[in-house]
Amino acid sequence: MGISMIRSIALLAAGILVASCMHQMAPPEQRISAGTITFHNQGRDRIQVYLIGDKEDWLLGRLESLETAHLRLPESVSAAADGSVVLAVLPGWSRVLAPRVDRRAVLSMRERGGDLPGEEWSFVNGQLLGPMQRPSGRNF
């Protein structure tokens, strides 16, 4: 096998590698649905994230330690933009029947349901941080 053949194979492999990385480098705003929030669990424990409305509670998702997830919001919350909701984070993964009255729950301030899509939240050292808006993609 000559040097030119090895060089051709190396260039082909490098091209395939670059092409596969280009797909993964797409801006996150294009891949995330408008009906989701981004949630970062920056703690050591597993957590459950609930959305508490005036009449109903929804389990949005469960996250492992140091996991980030895009949690889908219920359609009824996005449609009722005037309704207020609260995010609740509970440790562990056992289903909670009433997260609004669980003493372990860490609650956010009241938010308008229509404002939630696109927000980012973090859970760090037992505290719920947010909302943070995603960057708009503009470079300054």
Image (cartoon, rainbow, N blue to C red):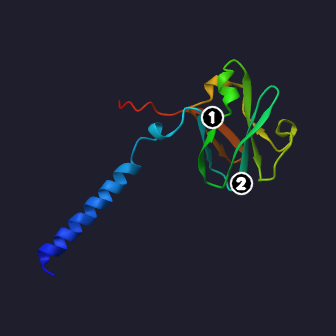
Residue hosting label 2: 46
Q: Residue furthest top?
A: 82
Tell me how far mark 2 sits from mark 1, CA to CA: 19 Å
Element type at mark 1 = strand
Q: Amino acid at mark 2?
A: Arg
> Considering depth in this image, is 29 or 122 the residue closer to the camera?
29
Q: What's the residue at 59%, 48% (across, down)? A: 68
Q: Residue furthest bottom?
A: 1
Left or right: where 128 falls relative to 117? right
Picture mark count = 2
Left or right: where 117 falls relative to 29? right
Q: What's the residue at 87%, 37% (across, down)? A: 101
> Considering depth in this image, is 50 or 4 the residue closer to the camera?
4
Mark 2 / mark 1, whichever is N-terminal: 2
Counting from the top left corner in percent of width and height, residue 48 is at 73, 47
Left or right: where 133 falls relative to 81? left
Residue hosting label 1: 130
Counting from the top left corner in percent of width and height, residue 74 is at 68, 33
| Mark in the foreground, 2 or 1 | 2
Q: What's the residue at 81%, 49% (across, down)? A: 95
Q: Amino acid at mark 1?
A: Gly
